[in-house]
C-alpha cells in the first residue's frame, strides 16, 4: 500500500506539488496577506478535499477548525496519491501483458 501511495513517480510528483502549494501558502501567510493563495491546496486535492470541507461545515456549522481543514487536505492528498499509484500500476501491468514476446 505504501508503494502505491508514495513510492512511485506519479504519486511522488503529485505529493510534491501539493506540498509545495502548502509551503507557498504558509510563506504567503507569514510574510504578507495571503489573499486566495490558500485555495490551491484544496483545488489540487479536489474532489476529496471538497468532501472533507462539506463534512466540516456540517459538524461545525460553517466554522471548521484549522486542524480539521489541514487534516482534510493531508488525507485527501494521500487518498488521491494512492489512486494515482493504483492507476499507474494497472497501466504498467497491462503494458507487460501486451508486450510479452510470443513463444513459438
Image (cartoon, grey):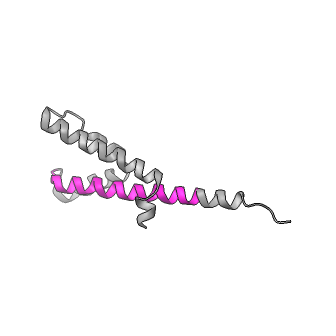
Residue lying at 34% horizontally and 43% vertically, measured from the top left:
43
* Relative horizontal placement of residue 74, taking residue 60 as reference (left or right): right
* Relative horizontal placement of residue 54, taking residue 102 as reference (left or right): left
* Relative horizontal placement of residue 69, taking residue 2 as reference (left or right): left
- Rendered image quadrant of residue 93: bottom right
Depth check, front residue: 7 or 87: 7
- Rendered image quadrant of residue 39: top left
User: Where's residue 2, x and y in %?
Assistant: 41, 65
User: Where's residue 13, x and y in %?
Assistant: 41, 47
Q: Which residues are magenta?
A: 63-91
User: Where's residue 5, x and y in %?
Assistant: 41, 60
Q: Residue reaching furthest right?
A: 104
Mark yes or no: residue 38 visible: no
Depth check, front residue: 47 or 34: 34
Is 98 situated above or below 28? below
Residue lying at 24% horizontally and 36% vertically, measured from the top left:
37
Is 52 situated above or below 26? below
Mark yes or no: residue 102 visible: yes
- Rendered image quadrant of residue 68: bottom left
Asked whether 9 falls inside the magenta stretch, the response is no
Which of the image's four quarters has the C terminus?
A: bottom right
User: Where's residue 85, x and y in %?
Assistant: 47, 58
* Number of marks present in the image shown: 0
* Relative horizontal placement of residue 50, taking residue 84 as reference (left or right): left
Which of the image's four quarters has the N terminus?
A: bottom left
Residue lying at 35% horizontally and 54% vertically, measured from the top left:
77
Residue lying at 32% horizontally and 54% vertically, measured from the top left:
51
- Type of secondary structure dominating the magenta stretch: helix
Depth check, front residue: 63 or 49: 49
Amino acid at each position: 500500500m505504501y508503494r502505491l501511495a508514495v513510492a512511485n513517480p506519479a504519486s511522488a510528483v503529485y505529493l510534491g506539488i501539493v506540498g509545495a502549494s502548502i509551503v507557498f501558502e504558509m510563506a504567503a501567510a507569514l510574510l504578507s496577506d495571503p489573499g486566495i493563495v490558500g485555495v490551491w491546496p484544496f483545488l489540487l486535492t479536489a474532489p476529496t478535499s471538497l468532501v472533507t470541507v462539506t463534512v466540516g461545515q456540517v459538524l461545525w456549522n460553517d466554522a471548521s477548525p484549522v486542524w480539521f481543514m489541514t487534516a482534510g487536505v493531508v488525507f485527501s492528498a494521500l487518498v488521491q496519491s494512492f489512486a494515482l499509484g493504483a492507476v499507474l500500476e494497472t497501466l504498467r501491468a497491462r503494458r507487460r501483458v501486451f508486450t510479452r514476446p510470443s513463444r513459438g
